[in-house]
Image (cartoon, rainbow, N blue to C red):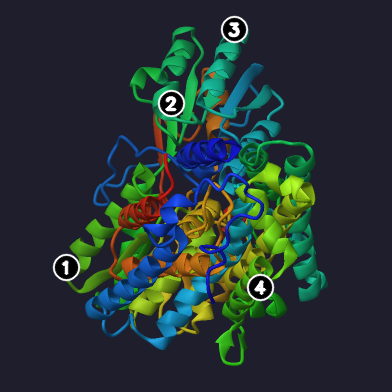
Amino acid sequence: MMDVNGSNEPIGDPAGGVGTRRFALPSGTKLQEYTLVGVIVALIVVGAILKPDTFPTTANFRAILTQSSVVGVLAIGMTLVIATAGIDLSVGSVVAAAGIAGGLVYETGAAVFVLAALGFGLLLGGVNAAAIAYGKVVPFVATLAMLAIGRGLALQMSDKKPISLLGADGIRWFGTGKVLGQPVSVVIFVVVTIAGWLTLNRTAFGRHVVSVGGNREAARIAGVPVRRTIFTVYCLSGLLAGVATVLLCGRLASASPVSGQLLELDAIGATVIGGTSLAGGRATITGTFMGVIVFGLIFNLLTQLNLATEWQQIVKGVIILAAVLVQRPERI
Amino acid sequence: MFNRHITHRYFAALMVAPLLVVTACSGDDDATDDTAAPAPSVDVDESTPVDTVDVVQTTSGSSAPGPRVSIVASVPPTDHGWLGQIAAKAQEAADQWDDVDFRLLEAADADSQAAQIQTVINERPDALVVLPYDGAQLTPIAEAAMEAGIPVINVDRLFDTPEAARATILGDNYQIGAKAAAYVAERLDCSGDVVEIQGIAGISVTDDRSQGFADTLDALCGNGISIVAQQPADFRPDLGLQVMEAILQANTSIDAVYTHDDDMAEGVVAAIENAGREGEMFLTGAGGSCTAFDHIADGGLYGATYLYSPTMAGSAVNMARLIAQGRGFADLFEPEVPSLIVVPPTQVTQDNVADLRSLCFD
């Protein structure tokens, strides 16, 4: 998989303000992806040296991918959102609320659980979408409000108690089952990633997403359905939060109203270190995928080394900062 | 250009994002643990256990009707199971008395709780039960209530000064760790590898539960049992799952897991079961959730939990009633209610889980 952008100048950007530095440096996205590959290799090498028996094993890499699947699915949605120069702070809360929505009806079957979770995620994403695309609320504020609303709904609907899914084997299959010898959640993560890549790089909608983020006015003049595009990305982000909750609840064997706190920051962080520009107009699913893997490797390695979590926070923060610095080729 | 403005705005926004998110979540965070309580100021060494009052018995002994009294209870937002139960137990206790006018106030944060108590002081109730959002921040207002002649009963999170409360009832986090260590030491015969899944890093509840465990394990077994992994999971099931998954990868042999909280332990249990390693180890919880009781009754992975019971709020209301009526506990010789009651964390195992069933909370 390759990046979208780099060569993909925002459609209809008449000003062309970013053109000059291109001849001097590799594009921010490219440079960042090479750097990320290096970071991933370095983390694996360090892990293999420090924990030769337990780190470089098939089972452990499978575990890392499984653990990354929840943030990974969210980050794919986040990439599309950020590509439009937006942000979705609500995904962690939506994960909790969608899980509870599924949990309330889980006894009627795994399919109903999944439908309810996806449906509720889509609904809350739709509220974000309507507020931002048609209500003209700034994405940061609209989704910050949904962060509070989603968490409140999760607590209210669950009566502040976790819903146990211990007996629900159909739901637990999403967290613990296997397809073609691989964990179901990893397969779903990979499928969502590929679908996200195709959407962004091979469809008119994907081009609209990038152009809306690159230069909204120019996109509008060029005939891009700006509102509909923005509306759709927030709906997708909500829907993917529903997918993420299915993966999480399946593994956790319970739907908890306190789940998912700060997941949005991991999803945003993974997207940003992947090379997607917070300013919009430049997005890469491949980069996001690698960003998610970097976070997964860091968590796994530092936990295996039994380092305190404050080190994980410091390492994550430093990597995000470094990534944004690499990404900052445009004039200030 | 419009685009550039957006850039700067979102970079600024990203900087602020964690702050806002933390603020928006702080209600939950605080409540995610069943505790968020400051350490008991009185160190309870296991060799010299503090005599505690059996509140259930005592109240039945002091149940003769007295003069009519008004009691107000003030608690933080009840957005977590444990705090919800705190409110419920206080109400239940008040409902059993015909001679008590009771009102329960829920405050969103420390400031609004202080404002609420200020209003209550002007209404001059006969006693005030307070589980402070934050002990330090609410100390001045509790002192003001005491100065105004309203006895304050402090529940679980301690005020900073003795002048702020007439009586205090609290749990004992250090002893949770100490008792869990004794249980683990006995079951493992002082030999094996243990994992500790902690609460929120850097708060006294976590420190006390961890310290009690480490001290006691060391005293009982020396180097016989080693803590091979020790990670916080913030009292949250989803983090418990994630942390335990990684620890299971890193350690091919684990004999026991000590967790700081029953809700969080649910995630740890799921991780162990998903890995098919439930036969290899056992675990202990803390808090006293009904789900944990179910696990313990079933036998297997979940060996024990330790009560950190919200019933203490009910006991506090009963204490408030007796203090307001100028009476002591009928079962004690002293004419006044004791000023400090430390509730020991009762160990729940398969042996007594059925007897203690009524004390679990959802």
Q: Nearer the viewer, residue A266 or B169?
A: A266
- Residue position marked by numbered label 2 in the rendering: B167
Can marks 1 and 4 be said to lie on one chain? no
Q: Give the crowd class for mark 1: few <14, some 14-19, many >=20 residues within 10 Å.
A: few
At label 3, which amino acid type do we have?
Asn
* Mark 2 or mark 3: whose residue is earlier in sequence: 3
Between marks 3 and 4, how big is the CA–CA gap?
A: 67 Å
Between marks 3 and 1, how big is the CA–CA gap?
A: 57 Å
Q: Give the crowd class for mark 2: few <14, some 14-19, many >=20 residues within 10 Å.
A: many
Relative to residue B128, is residue B223 drawn left or right?
A: left
Instruction: Decide: is A324 above or below B339.
Output: below
Secondary structure, mark 2, is: strand
Q: Is residue B203 visible?
A: yes
Residue B122: image tag? 3
Of tags 2 and 1, the one toward the viewer is 1
Q: Residue at x 38, y 69 (%)?
A: A34
Can marks 2 and 1 be said to lie on one chain? yes
Between marks 2 and 3, how big is the CA–CA gap?
A: 21 Å
Which quadrant holds residue A241? bottom right
Q: Residue at x 75, y 40 (%)?
A: A131
Can marks 3 and 1 be said to lie on one chain? yes
Return the chain for callout 4: A
The N terminus of chain B lies in quadrant: top right
Return the chain for callout 2: B
At label 4, which amino acid type do we have?
Leu
Of tags 2 and 4, the one toward the viewer is 4
Do the numbered discs 3 and 1 sit on residues whose CB atoms are within 8 Å?
no
- Residue position marked by numbered label 4 in the rendering: A198
